[in-house]
Image (cartoon, rainbow, N blue to C red):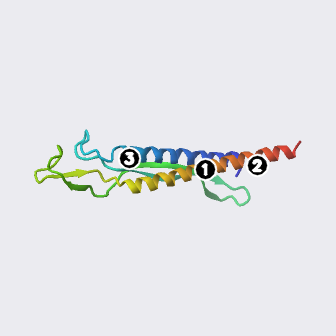
Amino acid sequence: MGILDILKISASGLKAQRTRMEVIAANLANIHTTRTDSGGPYMKKEVVFGTTEVSEAREFDKILSERVDGVKVDEIATSSKPFEKVYDPGHPDADQEGYVTFPNVNLMEEMADMISATRAYEANINVVNTTKEMFIKTLDIGK
């Protein structure tokens, strides 16, 4: 694995975590959206990650081995968590019994996910910076 491979993997992680943060931000922005264009309350979105793999032929034993080449967003799925029903007969979206169906977005879960995504993003930045420093020191040795 070379320096460019390390940077490529970290860059894919940065991109995936950025997408995760954007989805979390959309969830938080719609935490009280009880009516959407498609009808019903907003449905929480969740990012599903996968790996990108590259087949690499090894010369010394002529076998194929799978190696991880990065991370990618496989899909942005809709959460299957149940909606929250709140009794509020004065709300414009209340049903005949006076209950309003709110999105299945939990503020605390979203904030915890945002912190986790931020930390993962920072970890990938640290890998890029450390790799860059190692590369610079390697070049300095050759002087």
Q: Amino acid at mark 1?
A: Asn
Could you tell which of marks 2 and 3 lies nearer the N-terminus? 3
Residue at 34%, 52% in the rendered image: 105
Position in image of residue 64 (x %, y %) = 63, 57
Disc 1 is placed on an element classified as: helix
Rounded to the nearest whole Å, what is the CA distance between mark 2 and mark 3? Answer: 39 Å
Out of 53 and 99, give the one closest to the viewer.
Answer: 99
Q: Earlier in the sequence, mark 3 or mark 1?
A: 3
Residue found at x 22% / y 43%: 39
The reply to whether discs 2 and 3 touch (Cβ–Cβ < 8 Å) is no
Question: Which numbered circle lies on residue 134?
Answer: 2
| Foreground residue among 62 and 117 | 117
Identify the residue under disc 1: 124
Crowd rating for badge 1 (residues with CA inside 10 Å; few <14, some 14–19, many 20+): many
Marks 2 and 1, the one that precedes in the sequence: 1
The spot of residue 107 in percent (x, y) is 37, 53
The residue sitting at 70% across, 50% down in the picture is 130
Quadrant in the picture for residue 26: top left
Q: Amino acid at mark 3?
A: Leu
Relative horizontal placement of residue 82, taking residue 28 as reference (left or right): left
Type of amino acid at the residue the image marks with label 2: Met
